[in-house]
Image (cartoon, rainbow, N blue to C red):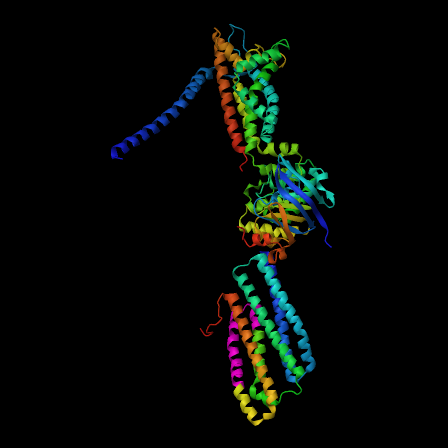
């Protein structure tokens, strides 16, 4: 019996009067990769941003319903604590341009004023970069700024930065849509390795990516969670007609 | 469409191009003229004594502009200390809140303040600070200059921060950073080149302002470091001595003009260098 | 992509395992036939369930790989070939089971002379070799070996073709062998089909490795 790390019950989110996420109920199991897919404007990104409470930072944005992390309601916790446990990687790689690669990886500690002894910092940097398969490539240029890195490397640096904070869940908002196919491939391989220690939730508009990398897939349509099942089943025999139409590209 | 009308139009086009070049060059001429004139008049007056001595009483030769130099530096420094934090914070506020009422009024005030004549600011400072404190002071001069610096710093900070991509803030927030840290540790450091150039420009602007200092710092023939007492500054010295009947004092004014010019020139060049060096490309 | 490669590798292993199983089924059926060993024959019939189970699993795995990975080029051809090889192997398994069932039902073993005259033993030998060769060709990706299977099928075809006349002649002198002759004919037909299935498998291997379609073509081109 796998344990559930994240749970949503009757979760809704809106931008003012625009109700974009409708009554979502979902159980996300620990150490799994969950893909969230759906056409543009279906509410998948909004839902993702509700998980680490980035949604509420937009003026006029509201949400209600239950969202539990390990049984504790995220909306009763301080948002800062939520974001320390639930990290996020964005669509465009966004390493801090004024910091070196080393400082970028431990930015979560350094910029938060958390003082660590040098040995500890070095260990975190090496471990995080190794986890994202970047250590060998950058270990001799740690003090340089990250601007010479390729798009895929920059994105892996952002993942390393997130991983350094040892979150429990990592959210990915279309993490490879700004990358070329080879970089996309290296990042996707990374997902499998990260699964061992973290739970990953990946929003993607690329169906093939959802099929390739995830254990379970959630299909959102017009704000509703239409279907949520094992990826194999979703792509060989989906239960809902809307899912089938989306997957086969038959949307009119 | 015959060949003559085409030729006429081509001729007009060339004529227009020539006109543009001539007018562009014409813009440079006054600058070269001023530079040449002042350098010629002032360069002979400058030497080490000139820089470290205060003006001598009338009749005696020699003397220098030490009190004005020191005074200018102190007044500008204090003005910066007042204006920079307020300006940056206001700029941050405006770039974060685009639609609130306070932002609207803040922007409006900044725009109006930018257009207020400097002498009016000087008079206002006179009534606010000089009269209640019963005396002219460097502090009131700095206050007046700070008011003039604010619009430039606020606007350039706001524009710089607006150009930063939203992804930068998002990355910081997603790492669990509280808002004040996002601003101080991420946003401002990344935008530092734009903010700094705004500060430098505002300093370059107020360096030569005379009118606000007329009724506030007032001037002082002696070298002074006291903020609560009147203080000399370069523009004041030039104003007073250039129109005086004494040749010695006129010479001091020429030398001071050259120093002022060089100061502003170097400040502008320095600003350009830092902006290019520290600019973060996105 | 590492994940797809892993899946394809696992699939290949599964197919090879099924192949080995079918090979052994065919060989055991031959041994049972030769030695009139009913116990061995029963074993063959029982094991047929495993062959069927393997076929279902391989079909399902192929479906999943298609759905999840949308493979192209050689990977796509590999999967298409595997699907067909899968069903060919299952049919060969059925034939082995059929032979086993005959041995169980038969009352007496075949007479030496019948066996000699029809050349059924060398035919069976060749059929088993064909299957083994195709397995090697698949495992080692050897198209030359795959092509060699086509020629072997000619021998099976010739034995099959000759069998009518041969048996007719024999029965003229030994009418008491009629019942046995009919059974033998049926087994010869089945072995000929084993040859055809093996040939199809060889065609699929060449399709997967070289993207050449040899189906319905003159093999000596």
Residue at the image point whose x is 68% and y is 75% from the top = C46
Q: Residue furthest bottom?
A: C173
Above or below B188: residue C100: below
Q: Nearer the viewer, residue B202 or B43?
A: B202
Depth check: give the residue in front, A163 or A127.
Answer: A163
Q: Is residue B83 magenta?
A: no
Asked whether residue A10 appears in the rendered view, the answer is yes
Q: Quadrant of the N terminus of chain A?
A: bottom right
Asked where in the image residue B16 lies, by quadrant, the reply is top left
Position of C90 relative to B182 (above/below): below
Please state the horizontal and vertical placement of residue B94, each as a whole percent of the image: 59, 28
How far from the left and from the top, in percent, is residue A56?
A: 65, 37
Magenta extent: C134-163
Q: Is residue A119 visible?
A: no
Task: Report if residue C135 lies within the magenta region.
Answer: yes
On the image, the x and y values in percent for residue C201 come to 55, 71
Name the dominant secondary structure of the magenta segment.
helix
Marker count (numbered): 0
| The image quarter in which residue C90 lies | bottom right
Which of these two is toward me, A182 or B243? A182
Question: B227 left or right of B16?
Answer: right
What x and y, as percent, mark residue C25? 64, 76
Q: Quadrant of residue B99?
A: top right
């Amino acid at each position: 019996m796998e344990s559930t790390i994240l749970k949503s019950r009757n979760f809704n989110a809106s931008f003012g009067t625009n109700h974009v996420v409708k009554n979502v109920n979902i159980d996300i199991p620990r150490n799994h990769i969950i893909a969230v897919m759906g056409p543009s404007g279906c509410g998948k990104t909004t839902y993702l941003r509700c998980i680490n409470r980035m949604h509420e930072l937009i003026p006029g944005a509201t949400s209600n319903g239950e969202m539990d992390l390990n049984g504790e309601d995220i909306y009763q916790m301080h948002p800062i604590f939520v974001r320390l446990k639930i990290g996020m990687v964005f669509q465009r790689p966004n390493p801090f341009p004024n910091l070196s690669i080393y400082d970028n990886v431990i930015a979560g500690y350094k910029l938060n004023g958390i003082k660590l002894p040098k040995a500890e910092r070095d260990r975190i940097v090496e471990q995080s970069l190794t986890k994202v398969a970047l250590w060998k490539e950058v270990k001799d240029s740690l003090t340089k700024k990250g601007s010479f890195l390729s798009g895929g490397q920059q994105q892996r640096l952002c993942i390393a930065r997130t991983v350094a904070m040892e979150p429990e869940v990592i959210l990915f908002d279309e993490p490879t849509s700004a990358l070329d196919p080879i970089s996309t491939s290296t990042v996707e391989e990374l997902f499998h390795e990260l699964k061992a220690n973290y739970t990953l939730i990946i929003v993607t508009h690329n169906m093939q990516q959802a099929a390739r990398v995830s254990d379970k897939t959630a299909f959102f349509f017009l704000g509703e969670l239409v279907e949520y099942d094992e990826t194999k089943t979703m792509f060989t025999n989906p239960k809902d007609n809307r899912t089938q139409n989306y997957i086969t590209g038959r949307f009119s | 469409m015959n060949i003559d009308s085409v030729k006429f139009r081509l001729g007009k086009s060339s004529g227009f191009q020539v006109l543009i070049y001539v007018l562009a060059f014409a813009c440079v001429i006054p600058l070269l003229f001023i530079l040449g004139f002042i350098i010629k008049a002032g360069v002979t007056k400058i030497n080490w004594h000139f820089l470290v001595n205060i003006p001598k009483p009338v009749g005696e030769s020699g003397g220098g502009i030490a009190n004005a130099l020191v005074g200018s530096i102190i007044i500008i420094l204090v003005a910066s200390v007042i204006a920079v934090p307020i300006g940056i914070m206001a700029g941050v506020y405006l770039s974060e809140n685009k639609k609130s009422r306070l932002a609207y009024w803040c922007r409006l005030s900044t725009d109006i303040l930018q257009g207020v004549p400097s002498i009016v600011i000087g008079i206002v400072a006179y009534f606010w600070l000089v009269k209640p404190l019963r005396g002219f002071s460097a502090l009131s001069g700095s206050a007046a200059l700070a008011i003039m610096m604010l619009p430039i710093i606020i606007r350039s900070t706001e524009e710089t921060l607006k150009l930063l991509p939203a992804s930068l803030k998002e990355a910081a927030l997603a790492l669990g950073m509280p808002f004040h840290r996002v601003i101080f540790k991420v946003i401002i450091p990344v935008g530092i080149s734009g903010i700094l150039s705004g500060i430098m420009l505002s300093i370059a602007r107020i360096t030569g302002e005379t009118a606000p200092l007329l009724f506030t710092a007032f001037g002082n023939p002696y070298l002074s470091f006291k903020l609560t007492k009147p203080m000399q500054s370069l523009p004041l010295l030039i104003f007073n001595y250039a129109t005086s009947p004494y040749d010695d004092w006129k010479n001091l004014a020429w030398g001071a003009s050259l120093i002022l010019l060089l100061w502003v020139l170097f400040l502008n060049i320095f600003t350009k260098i830092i902006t290019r060096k520290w600019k973060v490309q996105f | 992509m590492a994940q797809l490669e892993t899946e394809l590798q696992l699939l290949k292993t599964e197919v090879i395992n099924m192949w080995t199983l079918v090979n052994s089924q065919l060989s055991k059926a031959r041994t049972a036939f030769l030695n009139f060993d009913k116990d061995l024959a029963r074993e063959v019939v029982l094991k047929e369930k495993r062959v069927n189970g393997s076929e279902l699993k391989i079909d399902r795995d192929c479906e999943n790989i298609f759905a999840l990975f949308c493979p192209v080029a050689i990977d796509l051809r590999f999967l298409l070939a595997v699907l067909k090889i899968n069903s060919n192997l299952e049919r060969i398994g059925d034939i082995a089971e059929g032979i086993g069932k005959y041995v169980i039902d038969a009352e007496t073993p075949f007479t030496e002379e019948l066996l000699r005259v029809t050349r059924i033993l060398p035919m069976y030998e060749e059929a088993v070799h064909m299957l083994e060769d195709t397995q090697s060709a698949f495992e080692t990706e050897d198209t030359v070996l795959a092509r060699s299977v086509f020629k072997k099928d000619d021998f099976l075809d010739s034995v099959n073709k000759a069998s009518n006349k041969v048996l007719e002649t024999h029965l003229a002198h030994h009418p008491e062998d009629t019942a046995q002759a009919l059974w033998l004919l049926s087994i010869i037909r089945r072995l000929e089909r084993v040859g055809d299935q093996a040939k199809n498998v060889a065609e699929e291997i060449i399709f997967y490795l070289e993207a050449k379609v040899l189906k319905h073509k003159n093999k000596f081109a």
